[in-house]
Amino acid sequence: MSPGDVGVMMGSILLGVGIVAAVLGGHFADAMLKRYPGDGRLRVPLITYPGLLVCFALLAVPDFRANLIAFAGAKVISTMSAPAAYAAMQDLAPNRLRGQVVAVHALLGNIVGMTLGVTLIALITDYVFGDEDMVAWSMIAAGVPLTVLCLALAIIALKNTSGMFDKVLTSQQFAGFNVEKRR
């Protein structure tokens, strides 16, 4: 298969899956907020990130279709997590800092994701495996520990902020939903 054909397939997946996953991610974040008032959006990564580990496992299968499924699955999971992250930042940041928090998140996400992430995969491929055909294994070697780290950080964030919302929440409106305080 030519690189152009692969590009068309991956681009189609990104376009189709990305739009649907962004909308579903927003609905999922809202549903989590209804179920867990206050910190529901912070719980989204606890559900979505383990799915990334399954996608990394699919990368180990030496089949192009399995790799495309892994790519599509990772795109769905990462895109579904984004609306919850941006909404959670708005919930946690003071009003005067909300724009700056989102700007710093976007800046760091782009710097890490588009520069350091790609470079890390290339370095592992070249200097650890020494074989350019081992890119999938390089993605696994970098992605699994980073996903586990992000999952651990999400658990820490949830523990550190869970009591914060109890002080604010009553049966009043919170983030557009009529929620009841849970005990």
Image: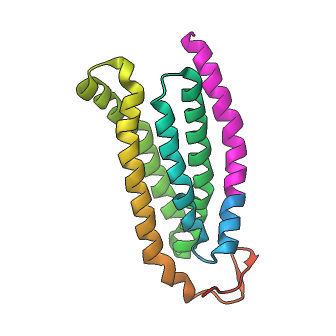
Task: State the residue lying farthest toward the top.
Answer: 2
Does residue 126 lie above or below 150 as drawn? above
Q: Position of residue 75 (x, y in %)?
A: 58, 40
> Which span is picked out in magenta?
1-26
Q: Residue at x 66, y 54 (%)?
A: 25
- Magenta: main secondary structure equals helix
Q: Residue at x 33, y 35 (%)?
A: 120
Q: Residue at x 58, y 53 (%)?
A: 82
Q: Position of residue 86 (x, y in %)?
A: 58, 60
Q: Quadrant of the N terminus?
A: top right
Q: Is residue 157 visible?
A: yes
Near-viewer residue (112 or 44)? 44
Q: Position of residue 175 (x, y in %)?
A: 69, 74
Residue 132 sits in which quadrant?
Answer: top left
Does residue 7 lie above or below 153 as drawn? above
Q: Residue at x 55, y 89 (%)?
A: 167
**145 horizontally vs 53: left or right:** left
Q: Position of residue 179 (x, y in %)?
A: 72, 81
Residue 76 sits in which quadrant?
Answer: top right
Q: How is the image coloured?
A: rainbow
Is residue 15 a member of the stretch shown in magenta? yes
Is residue 129 a member of the stretch shown in magenta? no
